[in-house]
Amino acid sequence: MSRSAVFLDEMGVGPLWRLRQGAAPEAVDVVAEAAVEMDVAVAAPVAEAVDVVIEVVTEVAAESVAEVRAEAPVAVAATPVPAAAPDDTAWFDDAPPPPPPPPPAKQLSDTDIAALDWEGLTAAVAKCARCDLCKTRKGVVMGRGDRQGAWLMLASSPSRLEEREGRALPGEQGKLLDNMLKAIAVDAGHDVYITHLLKCRPLDEAGQERLPTEAESDACRPYFDRELALLQPCTIVTLGSMAAAGINPGEKPVRGKMRQLGKASLVATFHPEMLLQDETGKAKAGAWADLCLAKSTHGD
């Protein structure tokens, strides 16, 4: 159906009939005359209707286009990037090389350690890699207490609890030691320094605590020697058999007997952990005697 036929059908105007070929001349003339009259009668209304429809369609189309333009995002013209040639790989050569890995921390010599102050010593212990314990440790345990104290309490190596706390003799062990010192009129908060011969906890392949090897003890000894030189205590009390044996390698320690380490008096006693497990009271009685011995020689 043509466009004109659609408009005529919408307005209720019937189709125009045309004579087929072979019709009688008279009929042709009659029909032709009627058709001319109908065309004349219908042409003006049809033309007006077509103009109205076209105007309405044009307005609707213009409004739709305006709405679409208002809602459509503004396109930003992208700057064209010239494509590289298929075989162009020169930019790989121009790219800067990745930064080199940071160098390992410099390990201080024994002479370097012997010249450190307290702050430098603490920093050196924290990043020490002088033995393989640095590969298994979860933290180091530096000494704590009064750095001008006249009393030095010395253990062998940190326990699991000490490694986790980052503090020598924490918890019940520390409380017991404080009470023991208080019993001989020593202020644990102002006149005592507590440390270990080793600053890391020795572990075996199964992750269990073990005795330190000779190489580990030798590697860590400069740190303790520097602590001792900075502290300059009058009395040293070793806590446990390993500390008593380790402070003077090759010398068999004897409890109940005073020894010398430089200008300091040296007395061996039990570790507070052992005293906490003592159900008979014999170890506690022995520790009391050891502390009384240390007190009697303190300052001589």
Image (cartoon, rainbow, N blue to C red):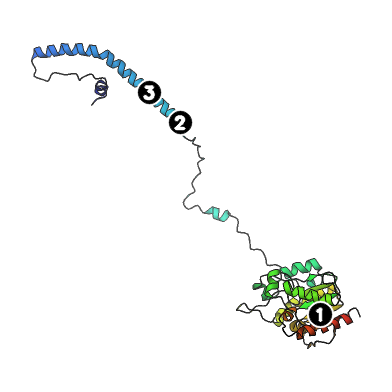
On the picture, is 184 further left or further right than 79? right
Which amino acid lies under the numbered mark 3 shown in the image of this protein? Thr
* Residue drawn at the location 82% of the way across and 76% of the way down: 181
Q: Nearer the viewer, residue 81 or 286?
A: 286
Which of the two discs, 2 and 1, sits closer to the camera? 1
Q: Of helix, strand and loop, which one carries label 3?
A: helix
Q: Are marks 3 and 1 in contact (CB under 8 Å)?
A: no
Q: Are marks 3 and 2 in contact (CB under 8 Å)?
A: no
* Residue drawn at the location 78% of the way across and 76% of the way down: 177
Res 294 → quadrant: bottom right
On the picture, is 40 further left or further right than 87? left
Res 12 → quadrant: top left
Image quadrant holding the C terminus, namely bottom right
Is residue 90 at all visible to an observer of this figure?
yes
Q: Label for residue 121?
A: none
Residue farthest front in this picture: 280
Is residue 110 at all visible to an observer of this figure?
no
Sequence order check, earlier mark of 3 and 2: 3
Which amino acid lies under the numbered mark 1 shown in the image of this protein? Val
Question: Gap between marks 2 and 1, in whole Å?
Answer: 90 Å
Q: Position of residue 58 (x, y in %)?
A: 37, 23
Image quadrant holding the N terminus, namely top left
Q: Label for residue 237?
A: 1
Q: Label for residue 58?
A: 3
> Which residue lies under the disc numbered 2?
69
